[in-house]
Image: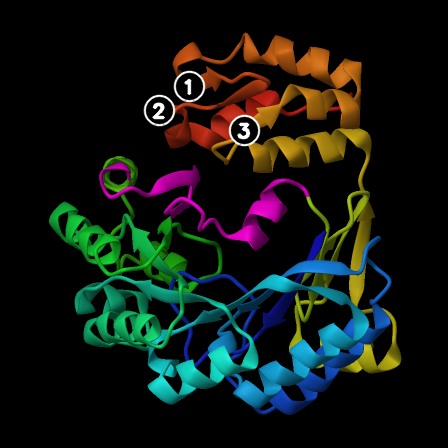
Amino acid sequence: MAGIYIHVPFCKQACHYCDFHFSTSLKNKAALIDALLLELEQRSDYLKTKEIQTIYFGGGTPSLLETEEIQQVLSKIRSLFDVDQNAEITLEANPDDLTISKIKSLKAAGINRLSIGIQSFYDEDLTDMNRAHNAEEAKVVVRNCLDQGFEHLSIDLIYGGTTLSDEHWIHNLETAFNSGINHLSAYSLTVEPKTALSNFIEKGKKAPLEDEKSIRHFEILKSMAKEHGFEHYEISNLAKPGHYSTHNTNYWKGEPYLGIGPSAHSFNGNSRQWNVRNNSQYINKIAEGFGYFEQEQLSASDQYNEYMMTALRTTWGVDFNRIQERFGTKLLTYLKKQILLITPSLIELTSDGFKLSPTGMNVADTVISECFFIEN
């Protein structure tokens, strides 16, 4: 099975840490929706299978769309693809967009999973990140979504920021774990180039982030998640049993997906492509029918490296049998030699491969890079 990702490139305001593609102007929204529908038609044969298991509206802020616009996109997908009747259909949302009437209309439209960008339950953190909602709205919207029957509900939290103390991080997690949600995405705040946060730090307007705090907060996250019955199934994602994100799980397992919208990426197993990162150019190029994406053919070693990069972030880790079947004996032999060079405490052997240990999760990028195959 495969998935479809829809990138909605609009936001009310720019979060200081964000480097995703978006615009705070909605003047081209109608034209952008038309372009999304046209791209779906133009690329309906991209996937080897038309059986769709997941649909994911990301961004940007998809909750800025009218429910009728979301229905348009879903109807177009269903007209072009065979969508599983039990497909996971996720929409990312900000708390300030989710009125009770909006929550009801989204559910009626077929959205069966919400991912809410809360980030913190403290106003000082939200102000520091330039979020559009406040802490009280964050708490209320979770209750309202649950009350309206959203059984699959995820929230995002961010840790490691200069305004977030250890005590407040513990309280954020307690609030989340006790709220009734069944999925949590928790991200370490990072300084991305060309963001407002990067500019503030460079000019001395904000203190640099502390790696020690981020590591400390991650350890707190792992400990509290276990206490509350949440499984840490990917470095940044935790869920109660049976409530993993199917869309993201398929991505980490290397399943194919079609990305629609400006800056969206697609992957079919053998190649990767990405759309132009500009709304006006995207709209115009889609109308012309060409020139709106770049494509890269992936060599066997490229595909192997991508598998290592995603699989080692997960609780199921790397499968030696899959390495053998997909990439052959040469790369499997290479990997087994590389494993011997990794500090033993950073990995755990499984029945058919290996994964990161709890300690290894703290230095995941380093361990993953040790497993990469670099062609001479």
Viewer-closest of 252 and 180:
180
Badges 2 and 1: C-beta atoms under 8 Å apart?
Answer: yes
Viewer-closest of 57 and 363:
57
Residue at (65, 19) in percent of width and height: 320
Nearer-N-terminus badge (2/1):
1
| Residue pointed to by mark 1 | 346
Looking at the rendered structure, the secondary structure element under dot 2 is: loop
Q: Position of residue 196 (x, y in %)?
A: 40, 65
* Category of crowding for the residue at label 1, using alpha-carbon neighbours closer than 10 angstroms: few (below 14), some (14–19), many (at least 20): some
Looking at the rendered structure, the secondary structure element under dot 1 is: helix
Q: Is residue 28 visible?
A: no
Q: Position of residue 280 (x, y in %)?
A: 69, 81
Looking at the picture, which amino acid does disc 3 mark? Gly
* Left-right relation of 177 to 307: left
**Region in magenta:** 226-254
Residue 337's place in the image compared with 88, above or below, is: above
| Residue pointed to by mark 3 | 317
Please say whether residue 253 is one of the residues in the magenta stretch.
Answer: yes
